[in-house]
Amino acid sequence: MKTTISVIKADIGSLAGHHIVHPDTMAAANKVLASAKEQGIILDYYITHVGDDLQLIMTHTRGELDTRVHETAWNAFKEAAKIAKDLGLYAAGQDLLSDSFSGNVRGLGPGVAEMEIEERASEPIAIFMADKTEPGAYNLPLYKIFADPFNTPGLVIDPTMHGGFKFEVLDVYQGEAVMLSAPQEIYDLLALIGTPARYVIRRIYRNEDNLLAAVVSIERLNLIAGKYVGKDDPVMIVRLQHGLPALGEVLEAFAFPHLVPGWMRGSHYGPLMPVSQRDAKATRFDGPPRLLGLGFNVKNGRLVGPTDLFDDPAFDETRRLANIVADYMRRHGPFMPHRLEPTEMEYTTLPLILEKLKGRFKKESDVYKAKESIYAKEEGQGHD
Ligand code: 13P
Ligand code: 13P
Ligand code: MG
Ligand code: MG
């Protein structure tokens, strides 16, 4: 039996701003998933949130991009969005870009990370969910987890991992993917994934046997909609242990709160702060960008767990550094590199401002001419 793990998420509206999912909307989604479980569409599920993003974690045997499973998720989001509208929640239905469902949720707004696997005797997994950032935010930690022995000693000392991992990197602008193998091609890999807004790690496979090890949601809402409609807060599934990175090697990559885009109005860089479920809500400057991690075991399609992976003093110093970095970045105010480059901003007034000032921009040479004539006049007047 093959098991599929589907993590599908959407922002369907939130309480008091882009802050936190309302429990009543989660209850509405729960009803839909409970009924799908009863009908045997899914085997098991867990519903949670990070910030204003509603997260559906589901298991089933129907494979990736399955119509019934995706329809279940879509209906859960629709029902939750209805409640959000009733309660007057902010940005109700934000990520549901279409009125009708057609086959699967890709391209309709929700983010999707799915993997179909042959369960190992013990199948530990970690699911990461982030708010106020984008899929490329996982590039740096994924590189550390699967290609950097200073993070993951298993790459050196575990015989099964010693052959390294393959990274499938998607060019989100061209819709083309390339497979690059580590350690052989790490410089090429880094040349691409160092531009995380464009080149996003989508899947990772073990070189030795092509075992699928990690999957990232790659929707970019701005590109889907043709105009920016919200940040595409990303989710990721990582398989753990026994010839794959240990849980602790995976978590270690998040001990450094690296800078990611997506803070405040989707238009600022800020540190990615790993938090517990309790702190999985956006506050300061609508952030800082937050990361929730849940650990499970999957057994015959059943989700055993979760454990709240960052609910631990071992990440206190990471959070403290993230807060110091947040202060430092905030002091730049509206200046880059705190504010994103113009092409990456969620919205901007720049074209309007340029239009308004059109008649007031003077050619540099004209400015000099004007100045020269002023000097000439002054000199002509003479000085006693
Ligand atoms: P496994 O090789 O059994 O996954 O354990 C690795 C380990 O020792 C974790 O630190
Ligand atoms: P979300 O993408 O999480 O809805 O946040 C929108 C935003 O810009 C908050 O400042
Ligand atoms: Mg929102
Ligand atoms: Mg969000």
Image: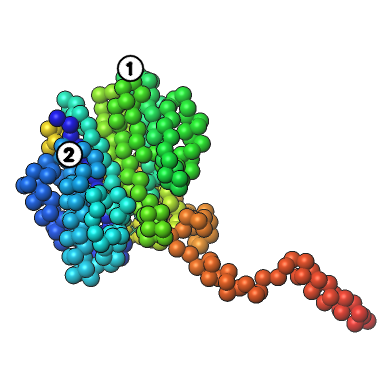
Q: 333 or 66, which is in the foreground? A: 66
Quarter placement of the C terminus? bottom right
Residue 84, given in percent of the width and then of the height, sits at: 21, 65
Residue 332, given in percent of the width and then of the height, sits at: 51, 58
Front tag of 2 and 1: 2
What's under tag 2, amino acid-wise? Answer: Arg
Quarter placement of the N terminus? top left
Q: Residue at x 79, y 74 (%)?
A: 370
Q: Badge 1, how many Cα within 10 Å: few under 14, some, many 20+? A: few
Q: Earlier in the sequence, mark 2 or mark 1?
A: 2
Q: CA distance from mark 2 to mark 1?
A: 33 Å
Residue at mark 2: 62
Residue at mark 1: 159
Relative horizontal placement of residue 308, taking residue 343 as reference (left or right): left
Q: Residue at x 79, y 69 (%)?
A: 368
Q: Is residue 332 above or below residue 196?
A: below
Q: Which mark is residue 225?
A: none
> By what rule are the colours in the image chosen?
rainbow
What's under tag 1, amino acid-wise? Answer: Pro
2 and 1 marks in contact (CB < 8 Å): no
Element type at marker 1?
A: loop
Q: Residue at x 12, y 37 (%)?
A: 302
